[in-house]
Amino acid sequence: MYIYNITSKIDPSIHENWVAWMKETHIPEVMATNCFTQYQFVRLLEVDDSDGPTYAIQYMANSKADYNRYLEIHAPLLSKKAANAWGNLFIGFRSLMQVVH
């Protein structure tokens, strides 16, 4: 299993609206691609929140092919939608992890 992790620092001025958008719009759109089987949306604790809170969303994919399909077909449009909605009021760091058994 693969985990696509996006960690984001959110400007305080959009915090509540961004969380609602993630729950109601963005995460459902990502999951509707059928590239991921489940997700986890978490807030990081014990980090410096003076510039805004930090969140992570982890999407689980059964295969690297599913992840690659998301990146090639779906990610460009969904990333553009996020940029159009929030501009530079958030920053994100992406990583791919593989579950070790």
Image (cartoon, rainbow, N blue to C red):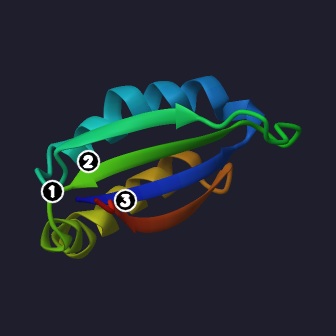
Residue type marked 1: Cys
Q: Residue at x 33, y 56 (%)?
A: 78
Residue 57 on image: x %, y %: 45, 44
**Dot 1: what SS?**
loop
Q: Quadrant of the C terminus?
A: bottom left
Residue with the mark numbered 2: 30
The residue that mark 1 highlights is 35
Compared with 85, 88 (above or below) is below
Q: Earlier in the sequence, mark 1 or mark 3?
A: 3
Q: Residues within 10 Å of mark 2 (few under 14, many from 20)?
A: some
32 versus 66 height, above or below: above
- Tag 2 or tag 3, which sits nearer the N-term? 3
Q: CA distance from mark 1 to mark 2?
A: 8 Å
Q: Which mark is residue 4?
A: 3
Question: Which quadrant of the rendered structure holds the N terminus?
Answer: bottom left
Dot 3: element: strand
* Crowd tier of the residue under label 3, counting other residues whose Cα lies within 10 Å: few below 14, some 14–19, many 20 or above: some
- Residue lying farthest to the front in this orientation: 101
Q: Is residue 21 left or right of residue 34?
A: right
* Residue type, numbered disc 3: Tyr
Front residue of 9 and 89: 9
Residue 97 appears left or right of 90: left
Q: Are marks 1 and 2 in contact (CB under 8 Å)?
A: yes
Q: Nearer the viewer, residue 26 or 47?
A: 47
Residue 73 position, x and y percent, is 18, 70
